[in-house]
Structure formats: C-alpha cells, structure tokens
Amino acid sequence: MKARVTVTLKNGVLDPQGKAIEGALKSFGIEGVDSVRQGKVFDIELSTTDRAKAETLLKAACEKLLANTVVENYRVEII
Amino acid sequence: MKAVVVLFPGSNREGDAVRALEMATGKKPQIVWHAEKELPAGTDLVLLPGGFSYGDYLRCGAIAGRATIMDAVRAHAARGGLVLGICNGFQILCEGGLLPGVLMRNKDLRFICKMQHLRVERADTDYTRAYTKNQVIKVAIAHGEGNYEADEETIKRLEGDGRVAFRYCDEKGVVGGLANPNGSTNDIAGIYSDKRNVLGMMPHPENLIDPLVGGIDGAGLFKSLVAA
C-alpha cells in the first residue's frame, strides 16, 4: 500500500521561502501568481494492506515526527 | 557541578561546550552519545551543543529531539535538573517538547554568522546569576533558523511569567529594528522552561570565554552554572 503525506505551514505562519519563490516567479514574468506557500511531500510505502491500520499509523507518524504541529498542518492520502 | 554534553550525529560545537564547561568547573564534562538510554549517575547539567544534528533533515532538531537519550533528558528536566540547549540544542529542546514554540528560517533567508548584543532579561536564575539585570553582553550568533515563533497565547505566557532569558539588542541595550537579526518574535534570543531549569538560546556564549577570541561575555553563564 502506498501513501502520500503532505505537510504545509499553517495559515498566518511566515514562510520566507515561499515568499522568495513567489518573488522569483514574478520576476520570471509568470503572471497571475498571487502567493506561494512551500510545503513538503512524503511518499511512503506500507507493509499493511489494511486501510484503517494504515491511516492510524500514518497519523502517528505525522504527530510524532513528520509535522511540527505548532506551525504545520498535515494531510494523509492513501493511494 | 557534574555536567554532560550530549553528542548527536552532526553536532559540531561540542568541543567548544566542553572547553567552556571545563574552564568553569575545572572538570572535563563527559560526552554522552545520543543512543544511550540513561544519563550518568549524579548528572546536574545536560548541555545540548550546537551544530547540524542529522544534517538539519526534515526540520532543524526534529530527529535529534526524538533520540533515545532525550527520554532521559526529559526525565532529568522533570526532576528539576538543569538542561541547556545552545543553537541547534535550542532547536532540539523545542522539537523535543522541553520548550514551547519553534525556530523558523531567518526572516531574510540568510545564514547569519556575526557578533551580536544581547540583553540579559533577569539575573536571578541558575544561568544568569553572574550577570546583572538588563546587562548588555556581546556574543556570537551562527544560525540559519533562529527566528523564534510561537502562538500568541504562548508568547503572552512566556512574557507574563518572565521566561524570556535574552533578547537581541544593540550595543546600548535597545531592542527592535535592525538589532533583531532574524525576525524572532519580541526579539527573543533565549527562553526558560516554567521552572527556569531548562534554557534554550540561539547565541553561543561558549565561544566568548577567552579574551584571545574577542571577548569573555559568555563566561558569566558558565560561572553562574557553577554557583548553581
């Protein structure tokens, strides 16, 4: 079973990297970009085939390590 | 004072920490590997040194904050034991749940390595007794992620409970504006735990203990600890 975890900064948390990328896109003449927020994607392969188990363990992985919930949100997708 | 320095893969300031502790205590502190389960018996102070533990992968201090030894460090802190995290050590304390908040990327995205003035916010803790309140000290900073952030309530609590240890300031002790190198909330350079036995700070007092390298303003912190 494969899963994808996406970790993004919470709204309101300053994202200087996203800002720099946003500025770069604008300077490259790519028009219509209002804002950019940078995040992380983790592609994870799981040994279980049980969906509920997978969701539980991925949530634990996010809470324990993958996201810092002080400033980040996470989303789990089982693919 | 029995001090130990914890070594993680990627720590690189442990030598400076050992030297500063040895100068202050007269004894060479023991180095403890991150995979150990226990601290040496009779440990008074645990120092988490600067560096780039685990290559700063995932987030600064994220993996080290969950290392095996950290359970013992958390238990030591819960008993009232002293824990000092410098630079990456501060990031590890935040990621490891010993201090609130998080160290984010510097506001201007640059790694900053320079001398920096700090204002000592209180001189009645085990870490600052050798200073005076509002004393301005000059130490070194060297970090890419030193921008302290926490939710509004946490900042209010830290301020209300007198848990800000040091603030970035200019040579006259004035905080704010250009004196803040990294965008840190309320110019925070270091914070205490609720009982003030845990201190996390981005600047490097351990590098300013010898007149040969430009000042001894960092020595006061280690002198304070010896008296603790």
Image (cartoon, grey):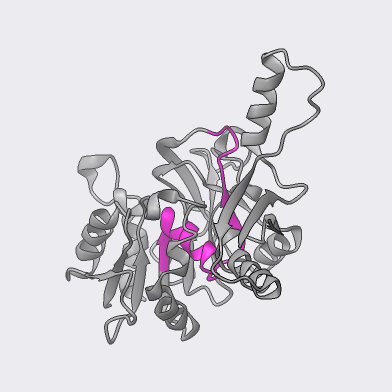
Q: Is residue B192 on the magenta stretch?
A: no
Q: Quadrant of the rendered structure where residue B211 is?
A: top left
Residue B123 in view, yes or no: no
To which quarter of the image does residue B206 belong?
bottom left
Question: The N terminus of chain B appears in which quarter of the rendering?
Answer: bottom left
Looking at the image, residue A62 lies above or below residue B139: below
- Judging depth in this view, the residue of A17 and B73 nearest the camera is A17
Q: Is residue B67 above or below residue B187?
A: below
Q: Position of residue B31 (x, y in %)?
A: 23, 68
> Magenta residues?
B84-109
Residue B64 appears in view: yes
Q: Residue at x 48, y 52 (%)?
A: B60
Note whether B116 is above or below B132 in the view shown: above
Q: Is residue A43 left or right of residue B52?
A: right
Residue furthest to the top:
A29
Q: Relative to A31, is A66 above or below?
A: below
Which quadrant of the view contains residue B3?
Answer: bottom left
Reply yes or no: does residue B85 show up in magenta: yes
Left/right placement of residue B194 relative to residue A34 reads: left
